Amino acid sequence: MDTADTNPASMQTLAGTLAAPDTLRVLTCGSVDDGKSTLIGRLLYDSKLLLQDQIADLERDSRRHGTTGGDIDFALLVDGLEAEREQGITIDVAWRFFATPRRRFIIADTPGHEQYTRNMATGASTAELAILLVDAEKGLSRQTRRHALICSLMGIKQVVLAVNKMDLVGYDESVFEKIAEDFAAFAKRTRIESVTPIPLSAREGDNVTGPSSRLPWWQGPALLPFLEEAPSAPGLVETPLRFPVQWVCRPDHTFRGYAGTISSGRIAVGDEVVVAASGKKSRVTAIDIGENSLEEAVAGQSIMLRLADEVDIARGDVLVPADNRPEVTDQIAAHLVWMAEEPLLPGRPYWLKAANRMVSAQVSELKHHLSVDTLEETAGKVLELNEIGFANLSLAHPIAFDPYGENRETGGFILIDRFTHSTVAAGMVDFSLRRAANIHWQSLDVDRNARARLKNQKPTVLWFTGLSGAGKSTVANWVEKKLYAAGRHTITLDGDNVRHGLNRDLGFTDADRVENIRRVAETARLMTDAGLIVLVSFISPFRSERQMARQLMMEGEFVEVFVDTPLDIAEKRDPKGLYAKARAGQLKNFTGIDSPYQVPENAEITVDTTSATPEELADEIIAYLRQNGRLS
């Protein structure tokens, strides 16, 4: 057994640490209880970088929370949260600075539980090398493969396969060889370029900081010496300049500066730069950090740039070299790691955040899922929690991107739920879609305003939403009859009618409902271009899709009409017998029964069909249109 020295860290060791020449960013990952935190704790302990009071705390905590009997539980050095110590698991990413006289390390210890995959992906996004732990007793697990795949997609080229707990299998070489062989076959089909398997026992200290006499058959390196020699990934400083503007500073008319952090590359006074989106050029006249000025700055530094010209630049614009510009596109293909309980639904709008820019985006097509077991690509309409997929995304506005494989900083993004503001996915851009550059808006001489003037009305969408049987179509029908009688030009898009044609290929799953509304909203928008008053009568159960429809229209053009009828009343009406079928289990995914209805929060009009007739409600709605200038 390799025993640790329990003396406090010496000043010589600390001095060597600070003098170490470079830094390697490392990730520890793998399935739950494979020993990630224990390994890091052992590295810190055996490297004699723990102070005496830290060791005393560790011994005390080991008696209180430890899972190793009377021995020191090294995992407690890293698991800082009380919940982690009580449960004996890692929940959040724990960052540790660790060093030897030869090299500095920044280590991200990430959770193994599937429910915390998002935290693992966060740690992987900045790592150069991954230590993927495997329990020698259990072998490769589904979670091991998932973490390896995420590492691959996140651009980690080097992996150390740490086959841990060799003490529990009697240090059996054949066990190690089998696991190493299985993983090599898996990794061959990923983007991982280098795999180094190492047998070890984090708890006993075998092969962690030096060779173990209990592994005489192993002729390769121990873990720490290998990490000290592993090549660093190419630094961001060596890649082309990318400077996303975070803030435009204008304290008065004499000063204009552009603040932000350099994502990659370097910049110097006198350099020519262009705005990636517009191509407008200028030259750097000053680089400031606080009250100091620099001649040159590099990736990772937060600076203020001043330019020679007053170029139109806003937050989210990216300054780049004129001869090495990223693509500017609103259509991308990307890998997604889905992190939310609610599944990804193509067509649903999300916020996409990349660098300092946030735009509305939706998955226009889910190309395939990626099996974490076999790496097979399979078709599917949704992406569930922790699944990995490849998708086309459509953005509301063009944004500057590099492929993730070339630049993590400008090739990565996150998707954000528009209502909860929680992060739902991590994305890695693979390429820009060709249609982004080949499809353009065609300018037409006769526009929506001209058509509307001819009809003496303003284009408007009356969007009726409510439960089945609420009375949407009945009220909409009365509204249209009255508008027609008044000489207005209208069209009604009814949920049932549209499913006979335009949407006949769609079912009633959540994914199909999202696509159903997307198509109808786009159709309604085209009809407003014709100057029409469009009455849309759809259950449209989700706020996200109603919001998406609203954003397709011009200001004031979308009028949400909530037909507020309680479920029990709608169910008593049951004009099509659908509630009875749903209650009998003959109709799945029925809104109000086994599928949710999200009540509007700020509808322009709410009508109560239990206290007024459809004709009276139609008069209310037409009065609203007159009061708000929609009818001349």
Image: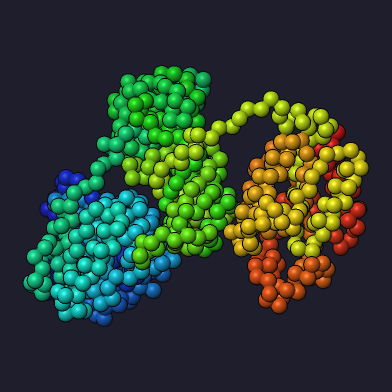
Residue 68 vertical placement versus 457 (above, below): below
Task: From the viewer's side, name the closer residue of 95 and 412.
Answer: 412
Residue drawn where x is 71% and y is 75% of the image: 583
| Figure quadrant of the N terminus | bottom left
Residue drawn where x is 86% and y is 63% of the image: 610
Residue drawn where x is 54% and y is 62% of the image: 342
On the image, the x and y values in percent for residue 292 come to 33, 28
| Figure quadrant of the C terminus | top right
Residue 123 vertical placement versus 290 (above, below): below
On the image, the x and y values in percent for residue 309 come to 44, 18
> In the displayed structure, does residue 232 sit left or right of residue 555?
left
> In the displayed structure, does residue 279 sit left or right of residue 211?
right
Task: From the viewer's side, name the closer residue of 63 and 191.
Answer: 191
Task: From the viewer's side, name the closer residue of 262 and 461.
Answer: 461
Residue drawn where x is 19% and y is 75% of the image: 175
Residue 220 lies in what quarter of the image? bottom left
Residue 124 vertical placement versus 59 (above, below): above
On the image, the x and y values in percent for residue 617 come to 87, 53
Residue 417 vertical placement versus 453 (above, below): below
Residue 245 lies in what quarter of the image? top left
Total numbered circles? 0
On the image, the x and y values in percent for residue 307 come to 41, 22
Residue 71 lies in what quarter of the image? bottom left
